[in-house]
Amino acid sequence: MFFLKKKNKITLIIHKNPDGDALGSSLGLMIYLRKLNYNVNLISPTNYSEYYSWLPGIKSIIVLSNNNKFFIEKIILDSDYIFFIDLNNFSRIGELKKFIKNSKSKKVLIDHHPCPLNFDIMFHDSKAPATSIIVFRLISDMNNLNKIDKDIATCLYVGLMTDTGYFRFPTIDSETHFIAGSLIKKGINIYYIYNHLQENYNENKLKLLSIALKNLKIIKEYNISYTYIKSSEIFYSYKQGDVDGIINYGLNVKNIIFSVFFFEEKKNSPIKISLRSKGKFDVNLFSRKYFSGGGHKNAAGGIIEKSLSETIKYFLNIVYKDFNI
């Protein structure tokens, strides 16, 4: 990147509970910059799902914990540049916010979510299907596509594939497929990637899915589906990421254009909400308005400080009284 110098200390930061695009785009950029001999650290405010533990370079991620807060604070305060990757505001980086406030570094945004905050330097395109595409563009703009090796290509491909719903979402275009093709030419193993992301189901993940399917409700007059999992229904251990993809089952029901999944991870903890839609209905705006969340037009998330029953009652009240779809 034209503004970087080799002596600069660079920190990459991703959002809480990082998904495939956050991990893929940040790891791809980290490997690329290190290949150019830059001093780069990659920090996550929370741990990542074990389903991504095979990604190249992932062991380099410094995950915030009670034991390394001072270490991470020093990294951030010593940084010349901090890159915020696949997030559009500081609410998504958890406890790292307080360290950022005291940092005099230049703040750089690399993201595709709508309505971002202003940063010192911005590489932002809300029409891009994935942040990994923006990272690919940056490497291309530096005339360094030849620097993309199999590891970088694997990371970027995972980001591209997961954030486009395995190339199903309406945001994809000819550039998406061109970039995917360019990454495939770097020798990535598509079967290996797909097998780790899509076919790596464990017994407990299927049990969680069965609970959600049992609780699935359809509101036919509004073409809406919703489901939920109560903490009292979970009698076994599970891994972060085991509920990923549950939301899509409701959306795949015939005529459904809006699907919601409510997850009570622990009793008396905030309810995590996943939202998906088809067509024109904007779940990003819906989530921002009602659930203090956000995301994309057809895929978003949120959180609410209510009990599960209160949350569902609140949601249904919105649907039946204030809703237009």
Image (spheres, rainbow, N blue to C red):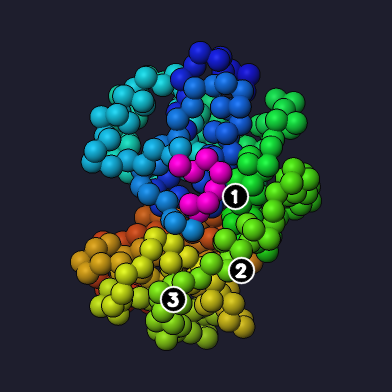
Is 56 left or right of 76, judged from the image as shown?
right
* Left or right relative to 119: residue 194: right
Q: Earlier in the sequence, mark 3 or mark 1?
A: 1
Range shown magenta: 52-59
Residue name at image x 32 percent, y 36 percent: 97
Q: Residue lying farthest left?
A: 268
Q: x%, y% of residue 157? A: 65, 49
Give percent across and percent down for residue 47.
Answer: 37, 49
The residue depicted at 51 percent of the width and 71 percent of the height is: 201
Q: For residue 196, which numbered disc appears in the image?
A: none
Answer with mark 2 or mark 3, whichever residue precedes in sequence.
3
Please tell me whether residue 55 belongs to the stretch shown in magenta: yes
Specify the amino acid type for callout 1. Answer: Gly
Residue 86 in picture, x, y percent from top left = 51, 43
Residue 237, position as x, y percentages in the image: 32, 70
Circle 1 or circle 2, nearest the eye: 1
Number of callouts: 3
41 vs 174, left or right, is left
Residue on which disc 3 sits: 203
* Amino acid type at image mark 2: Lys
Name the residue: 61% across, 51% down: 158
